Each structure stands twice: as C-alpha cells, then as structure tokens.
C-alpha cells in the first residue's frame, strides 16, 4: 500500500509536469499564429536564422566589431533591403548608390567612372582636371580613368588640338548607361576592372550600332534610346525620350519641319499586332502631336497594317530600319 503522503507527492509531480508541457505547447501555438514559416527551416517568420544575418539585425554593433568589411558604415539615409522574407534597413550613399559599391575596389572604380562622366557633363568639357575634381584623385589616377573611358567608347581620343568629344549624350548616360554601369557589380560573373570596361564598351557600342543583330539583343529601354539616336541622325530635332512609366503610349517625341511626331518603339522577338497602333493613336491626342509612328525590329501583322492605314499611323519595320541604316552609313 502506498501511503497518503507518497500518493500526494507523486500527484503533485505529475501536475507540475503536465503544467510545464501545456505552457510549452501554448508557446508553440502562439508562435505559429504570429506568422508564416521561413522557407523549409520550420522557424516562425519575423526572425532570421542565418547566423550572420541574424547578428546584423539583432546585434549590429557586435557584428561590425568582428567583421571589418562593414566596420565603417556608409553615410546617408537608410533604405529597405530584403534578406529572405525580412526587410532590414541598410545605409545608402546620398545619391542612392547600392552599398556594395563602397566595399570593394572594383565597386569604387565603378563609382569613380560615374562621377568622372557626370563631371564632364557638368563642366561642359572633357579633361583630366575635371576627373581630378570629380573623383578627388591625383593626376596619374585621373589620366588612367580618362584612358579607360576612351577604351569604353564613352569619349574620343585627343584630336589634333588635344580636345576630346563625347560619343554619348547626357540623357543616354543618366537614363540608361549609368544604370547599367551601377548594376555591373551585381550581374557580372567576374567583377574586374577589365570586365567592367568591356561590358560598358559593349553597351555603348550596341546603343549606337548600325547592326540589327545588335539591336535584337537590346531591352526595351535601350531600343528607345537607339531609335532616338537614329532619329537625330536623319534630321529630327528636339528628340525626347518620354519617362518609362505613364508615357501614354508614346516613347519618343520629336519634330521635323514644324511637324510634331510621336513614336512608339517595340523591340520584340515576334511580329507586331494591333496594340501598339492603338496606343500611339491615343497618345497623339494626349501629347497634342500631329503624326504617329510605330518602330519595330520585326514586322507587322496584316491586321496591324490595315489598322495603321485606317488611323494614318506610320509603320517602320525591319526593312525600313535597314534602309535608314544604309542611308546613314553612306553619309558617314
């Protein structure tokens, strides 16, 4: 027979064990109710379980003490950056460049190229002195940057008088090429100075290429700026690429002999249907333009051609572009 005292003791222990298990179970249920799972780890959302990332979030000061590559934080306002499902704030430079550019030599090289080119446009001329002022470099380093920009096809070599000229416009740099340059540290498989210059050279070359095979490789934005360059070459004036979003179907506005033109540019891998004709027709009224034109590296469907005739929209297909490029090459 178990005495009453022993029975009461055993019962108290069992109650304590059951209570502990219930509390633990409630905690698990509560965590599950607060968020979804992070991937396949089975851990609740709201916390990072990667050791380094978790330390950045929870112990930033301790992390920087042990990791010299981020010991000196960037200056400027923070921006949200996703790590997994979590948004964290990373300090950014004042002009919004990604933080990676400040943390390795090739990133600083990209930053200096950008500052040098922007300095040329700001100063209205190309010189080693302009690079020195823009980058804060000595003469030898600035001269090296000048040589690199010449190799990339951004600027010409020195002429008889020592003067250089631009091979790109300020708009092309600010709206297209600059964005590409700043992306190189993220997209290149091997980030070296020579690879950066080679990629920039390719992007500049394609932008002004007379080969439709090069044009076929372009994205939509690059094709718009390529078309703008072509229009300038054949006598159009006040050529302006409209903002990428909310352009109301008109990618380029230009003038020729006091006639205002609106252009929609489509760089596709398939032929073009009715939609671009409908969009440019509506865009003419929005911008108060006289004539609409759709430019493509491909061809137009029979239905698109019929609609263009009915709406007086001009169509420039691949054959038309070949004729224009031939004319440009003959006059150069």
Image: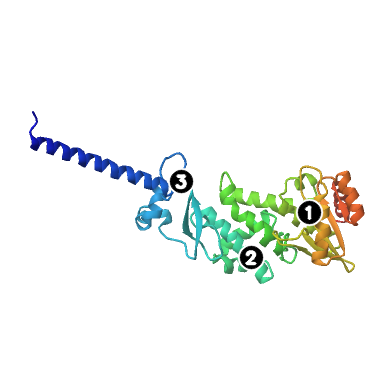
Decide: is 77 above or below 219. below
In this orientation, does residue 268 appear?
Answer: yes
Decide: is 302 above or below 289. above
x, y percentage for residue 296?
81, 49
Q: Which residue corresponds to mark 2? A: 118
Which element type, helix, strand or loop, lies under badge 3? loop
Q: CA distance from mark 3 to mark 2?
A: 46 Å
Quadrant in which the C terminus appears: bottom right
Circles 1 and 3: CB atoms closer than 8 Å: no
Quadrant in which the N terminus appears: top left
Which element type, helix, strand or loop, lies under badge 2? helix
Q: Residue at x 76, y 55 (%)?
A: 226
Circles 1 and 2: CB atoms closer than 8 Å: no
Which is more N-terminal, label 2 or label 3? 3
Q: Which residue corresponds to mark 3? A: 36
Please state which of the two labelled residues, at mark 1 or mark 2, is closer to the viewer.
1
């Amino acid at each position: 027979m178990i005495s009453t005292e022993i029975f009461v003791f055993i019962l108290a222990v069992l109650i304590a064990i059951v209570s502990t298990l219930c509390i633990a179970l409630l905690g698990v249920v509560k965590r599950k109710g607060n968020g979804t799972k992070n991937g396949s780890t089975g851990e609740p959302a709201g916390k990072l379980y990667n050791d380094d990332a978790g330390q950045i979030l929870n112990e930033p000061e301790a992390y920087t003490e042990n990791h010299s590559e981020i010991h000196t934080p960037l200056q400027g306002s923070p921006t949200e950056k996703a790590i997994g499902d979590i948004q964290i704030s990373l300090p950014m430079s004042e002009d919004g460049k990604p933080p990676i550019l400040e943390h390795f030599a090739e990133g600083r090289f990209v930053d200096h190229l950008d500052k040098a080119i922007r300095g040329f446009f700001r100063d209205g001329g190309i010189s080693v002195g302009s690079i020195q002022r823009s980058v804060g470099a000595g003469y030898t380093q600035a001269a090296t940057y000048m040589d690199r920009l010449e190799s990339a096809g951004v600027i010409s070599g020195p002429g008889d008088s020592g003067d250089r000229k631009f091979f790109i416009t300020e708009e092309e740099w600010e709206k297209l090429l600059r964005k590409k340059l700043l992306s190189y540290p993220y997209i290149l498989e091997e980030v070296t100075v020579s690879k950066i210059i080679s990629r920039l050279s390719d992007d500049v070359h394609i932008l002004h290429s007379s080969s439709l095979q090069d044009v076929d490789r372009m994205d939509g934005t690059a094709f718009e700026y390529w078309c703008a360059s072509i229009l300038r070459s054949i006598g159009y004036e006040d050529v302006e690429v409209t903002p990428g979003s909310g352009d109301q179907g008109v990618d380029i506005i230009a003038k020729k002999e006091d006639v205002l033109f609106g252009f929609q540019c489509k760089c596709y891998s398939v032929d073009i249907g009715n939609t671009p004709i409908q969009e440019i027709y509506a865009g003419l009224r929005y911008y108060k333009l006289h004539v609409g034109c759709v430019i493509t590296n491909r061809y137009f469907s029979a239905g698109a051609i019929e609609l263009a005739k009915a709406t007086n929209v001009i169509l420039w297909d691949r054959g038309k572009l070949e004729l224009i490029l031939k004319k440009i090459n003959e006059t150069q």
